[in-house]
Amino acid sequence: MQFSIEPDSGVAIYEQLVRQVKFAVADGLLLPGEVIPSVRDMARRLAINPNTVQRAYVQLQHAGVVRALRGRGMAVCADAQEQCIADRQRILGERLSQVIAEMLSSGLPPQQLREMFEQALSQASPS
């Protein structure tokens, strides 16, 4: 599983990691019982502070996405996928609503917004 961080995205680094783990669980790329990289390993891979990874892992644990395995790290919880799917829909829905609100407040007519959305979707979708 490959994770990446965008330092200039405006989203906190720990939050980017939380989202990526949740999205990977939602997509079935991280399966129940699968051990995620250790704090040190993840920090090294992403070239970020281990405390940032620890913060993300604690948030994931509190959300019921991962659980601590004594001496082995963190593993994906058995019932995490459904919750992660709902979280992904909520997170992305909020982002989409913000973009739509910004476009409408700029005076863009709804029909032009639809056309732009369709064009962006067709460009982003694999053929």
Image (cartoon, rainbow, N blue to C red):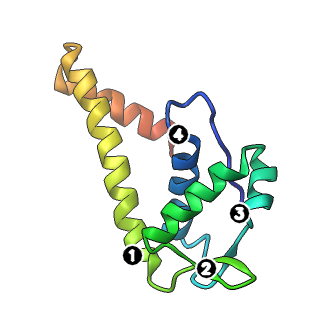
Q: Nearer the viewer, mark 3 or mark 4?
A: 4
Relative image position of residue 53 (x, y in whole percent): 65, 54
Distance from Cα at disc 4 to Cα at disc 1? 24 Å
Q: CA distance from mark 1 to mark 3?
A: 19 Å
Q: CA distance from mark 3 to mark 4?
A: 21 Å
Real-space Cα distance between discs 1 and 2?
A: 20 Å
Q: Quadrant of residue 13?
A: top right
Can you identify the residue that label 2 sits on? Answer: 68
Of badges 3 and 2, the one in the foreground is: 2
**Residue 1's mark?**
3
Which of the two discs, 3 and 4, labels the residue nearer the N terminus?
3
Q: Reply above or below: 40 against 66.
A: above
Q: Earlier in the sequence, mark 2 or mark 4?
A: 4
Which residue type carries mark 3? Met
Q: Which residue is mark 4?
A: 12
Q: Earlier in the sequence, mark 1 or mark 2?
A: 2
Q: Residue at x 34, y 65 (%)?
A: 86
Q: Residue at x 51, y 46 (%)?
A: 125
What's the residue type where badge 2 is placed?
Ala
Circle 4 sits in a helix, a strand or a loop, which is it?
A: loop
**Pointer 1 residue:** 82
Q: What's the amino acid at mark 1?
A: Glu
Secondary element under disc 1, as helix, strand or loop, is helix
Badges 1 and 3: C-beta atoms under 8 Å apart? no
Q: Are marks 2 and 4 in contact (CB under 8 Å)?
A: no
